[in-house]
Amino acid sequence: MKILVSAKRVSDPNAKLSISGDRRWIEGDVEYVMNYFCENAIECALQLAEEHGDIETIALGIGESDETARFIRQGALARGIDRGILVVADEQTTDSDLIARIYAAVVEREQPDLVLIGKQAVDGDSNQVGQLLAEYLGWPQATFASKLERDGDQLVVTREVDGGLETLALSLPCVVTADLRLNEPRFAPLAGIMKAKKKPLEELELSDLELDDAQPKVRIVHMSAPAGRKAGMIVKDVEDLIAKLRGEARVL
Amino acid sequence: MSKVLVIADHDHGVLKKLTLNTVAFAGHYAEKTAGSFDIAVIGHGVAGVAQAVTSYGAAAVHLVDHPDLAHPLAGPWAKVIADLATAIGADVVCMSASSIGKDVLPRVAVRLQAGMASDVVEIVTTSEGLAFRRPMWAGNLMGDVIISSPTKVVSVRSAAFDAVALGAGSSPIVASSAHPDAAGARVHFVSFDGTASSRPDLAEASVVVSGGRGLKDRFNSVMEPLADILGAAIGASRAAVDDGYAPNDYQVGQTGKVVAPQLYFAVAISGAVQHLAGMKNSKVIVAINKNADEPIFKVADYGLVADAFVAVPELVSKIKLLRA
């Protein structure tokens, strides 16, 4: 069995972000982290490999050459993923659709049985790539997974949906997108960090993937800061709070 | 002239109110492009939902009723939505960014060779045409995006659009011939484990009371009486959910639900960026936290620096007295 997992580098949404001069992207000293949900996807692949054996795990990262390679090695290979693939692309001009077509082209080359992707990237927050990929491949999908069990050629996946938990049974090959409660991602052991340096990491250009059209369908034309919210007042006690909510706010 | 297709949200045959927020988005878009909108109701045994949406100004209500659509599986739903959109010549397909909308719409986009904008909060006129404004980076930045494909797919952030009011007109109901593939499906519904609650839906409630990790295993004993007295839905921070004090579908934030009620209580919640992303557009925000330095106080209209274990029961009993 072969599993392809996502390893996306994101600019930290908790750090201070500045809008670039042309107002179409961010700039400055951006801090990068591994996308939280990709860490869950990677952990899930590692646990499946440990539990069932005979599973090859491959991490895919898409972005600038050096930085993305470093993230694939530190975030995926050092944790135990067998090898990496880096597709060099400019993150500002790749929308979810183009990312999904890059994934589909890599799936074509590698023929994995399962693709595990973080449910959303916490920079763009689009929550689309796994679903787009599943449709491009004509595969079934289970998004927002909080539990996954393998039963032969089937996966039983519990999904976090509005109002509760839904469980689906899927036949392989399929796409699963990872939610936060799927597992507790491990830290890379020191030995893993040493080993990762020697693991294979293939670098591909967009032109190697023979996409019909390497253009995005969605592009950002303007970025702005959201309307601010001013801090209000500190009330003295519960009595004062009730008085304010009944009086000036008129919500009680 | 545009044609917008709204996919109705319903819970196994009961219309969800957030459909009316999506209709508001569709109405705005149709108005800006001198177009009209239709509503599609998909499922099995859902004629009642179709009837329920005939008075909101749609040119037509399409009913796609089939046993294989009873559970909202993304593949079959995407096929019928795309087939219907093609049949009626829709150039925009939209649904709320509910868990079904998020699951299904990207697959619709692929079938229609369309670009998709997620979580849209506003339609913006730019020199390059109509753009969709959407939050990015946990709502720390807003991006205006242009979709260049002829057909466009949009998931709508319900909290950003006021629900349309019931109108007088009556849209015709059209039984659609769209149907799922007969071929053996490779995914099957197994079970649904609902969070039992008699409280209002978190995404639709006018009052939301959310608790944080600091409440620990007293989460329910502190939050439930407050929700009861206010008729509120209960929410939680990601930390409270991660530590198992609250179920996952209570989570408010970037990676959970986005709410914008009239009144929001943040109890023992510090106010991490990703939580603020889910509630900062609430009309009135009240924060109760014993640490005056927490970032939640920077967005709260009314802050009470106090121990939640003492302040919340006191608040509940005082409101009870007022209403006695």
Image (cartoon, coloured by chain):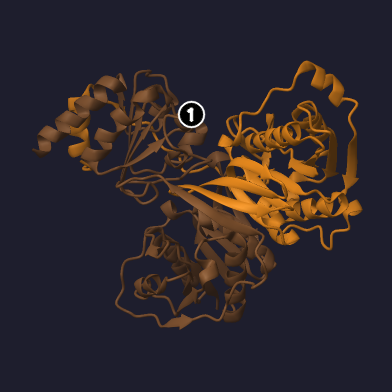
Chain colours: A orange, B brown
Query: Along the horizontal axis of the image, is A223 left or right of B296?
Result: right
Horizontal relation, residue B202 to residue A202: left or right? left
Q: Where does residue B48 sit, x and y in percent of width and height?
A: 36, 72
Residue at the (11%, 39%) spot, across then down: B323
Q: Nearer the viewer, residue A44 or B299?
A: A44
* Quadrant location of the N terminus of chain B in the rendered image: bottom right
Task: State the residue in front, A134 or A112.
Answer: A112
Q: Position of residue B274 (x, y in %)?
A: 51, 35
Q: Nearer the viewer, residue A23 or B225?
A: B225
Q: Is residue B264 visible?
A: yes
The residue under label 1 is B239
Of all chains, the one bearing label 1 is B
Return the residue found at the far front. A152
Q: Position of residue A135 (x, y in %)?
A: 69, 60
Q: Is residue A34 left or right of residue B42?
A: right
User: Can you say whether B230 is above or below B300 in the image?
Assistant: below
Amino acid type, callout 1: Ala
Above or below, B131 against A198 in this view is below
SS for dot 1 = helix
Residue A30 is at least partly visible in this image: no
Looking at the rendered image, the quarter that the C terminus of chain B falls into is top left
Q: Residue B272: where, in percent of width, then height? A: 49, 29
Badge 1: residue crowd in 10 Å (few <14, some 14–19, many ≥20): some
The part of the image, by quadrant, that contains residue B90 is: bottom right
Q: Is residue A66 above or below residue B103?
A: above
Query: Disc count in the image?
Result: 1
Residue with the most extreme left position? B324
